[in-house]
Amino acid sequence: MSKKILVYIDAINIGSTGGLNHLVNILNGAPDNFNNKKIIYKVWGKPNFLKKLPSKKNIYYKSNFFGRLPSPFNLLWNFFIFRFICYFKTPDYIFCPGGHLFFPHSQSVGVFQNIHPFLPKQISRSPIKQKIRLHFLLKTLVYSSKRFTKHIFHTENSYHIMSNYLNKKVNYKIIPHGVNDIFRTSKDIIIDRIENLENKINENKKISYTYVSSAEPYKNHIQLIDSFNVLYKNNENFELNLILSDGPFLRPILKKIDECNFKNNINLYFNCTQKEVIEMLHYKTDIALFVSSCETFGFILVEKMASGLPIFSINQSCIPEILGNNPFYFDINNPQSLYDQLLYNFDNFDNFKKYSLLTWEKSYDYYWEKAVNDTWDFIFN
């Protein structure tokens, strides 16, 4: 191999668990050579994230002061320092999983993983500080889109929404995320679980519902609690597991829970590990919920699909693209809707087995090996 290929990966502004999960898998599958040339990777990221990334001989990790700054202040790195480094070191390829690049490069690929800045209706629900941040992020992402030579999106839905703002002349590819195999369960376990749910319904035993999400306005916790208030008035025998991670809307959510009539039916969990989430989904959940109205892909949605759970969800954003057709959709803005859909499907119980298995099978459309191979093929070809 006469020459090395230098790939720079700017992940300084990757801050979410989903973004980290994506980066870990992409780096795990990074090829060692291309066209008989050895590939050297240099990755910049947040200090607390770097230790979670895979160790490989041809990947070098770096961080700096800017990686410790909150968004959007960490963009100072992209504006000045990263531009300076690339000007003098001249990498062959630049890959930006956070979607920001403020200078042109002939072989540059950006991943657009955050749909929130592109949805004015959802921005209007945010606190004022977050509104300012999201408006600023929109401008920087639009500016960056004109510097990349290629774009990656994770769903058709996110492409159609974002492309109204971004540079449409750039080559793009839809590459969905994968799902970690640790979430997958077996067909026999799904059937046993559904039979257990049927027995609970027939004997009026407690049914366990689970919703996993960050504390954001668009995750619709307030509306979900209103929906369960209708359920509580008709049948008190349930528990609602809310697994929350940090977010700007945590206080209003906790206040709503404290004031509701059935707070003793709600189990709160904060910042759970992946192992704890899997334990909840596999062993302590009868029916899963997914009511976020702003999703680029929906990691936890696919993880619930892989877990073989019946998923009562809203029919918005990329959710129907990922989940497919089923009779479990309801209107989160109508508190009566969830109760009506539950009642209908309890009376038509065959739907639980049929659609739990269908969505479980559909989860196999999303696997990391394909996502990783498609990503690197798109970057290098």
Image (spheres, grey):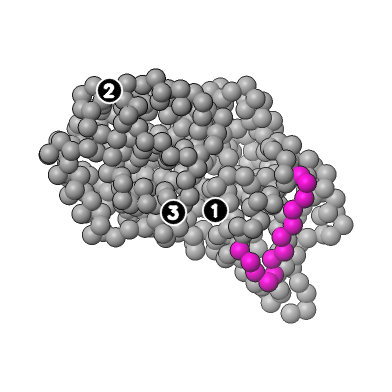
Q: Amino acid at mark 1?
A: Asn
Q: Which residue is mark 1?
A: 21
Whole-percent x and y of residue 115?
56, 37
Q: State the image quarter where residue 138 is shown.
A: top right
Whether the magenta-drawn stretch holds residue 381 is answered as: no
Q: Which badge, 3 or 2, is on the more N-terminal residue?
A: 2
Q: Does any portion of residue 110 appear in the rendered image?
A: no
Say if 188 sits above or below 215 in the image. Answer: below
Whole-percent x and y of residue 346?
18, 36
Q: Amino acid at mark 2?
A: Val
Give the magenta range: 54-66
Do labels 2 and 1 touch, CB within 8 Å? no
Q: Which badge, 3 or 1, is on the more N-terminal residue?
A: 1
Whole-percent x and y of residue 129?
65, 25
Which residue, as the protein is rendered here, is positioned at the far front?
264
C-alpha gap between disc 3 and disc 1: 14 Å
The front one of 106 and 155 is: 155
Q: Which residue is mark 2?
A: 230
Q: Which residue is mark 3?
A: 275
The front one of 85 and 362 is: 85
Q: Amino acid at mark 3?
A: Lys
Q: Does any portion of residue 206 appear in the rendered image?
A: yes
Density class for disc 3 (Cα within 10 Å; few <14, some 14-19, many ≥20) is: few
Do labels 3 and 2 touch, CB within 8 Å? no
Whole-percent x and y of residue 53?
62, 59
**SS under mark 1:** helix
Give me the residue at 50% from left, 52% from top.
177
Q: Which badge, 2 or 1, is on the more N-terminal residue?
A: 1
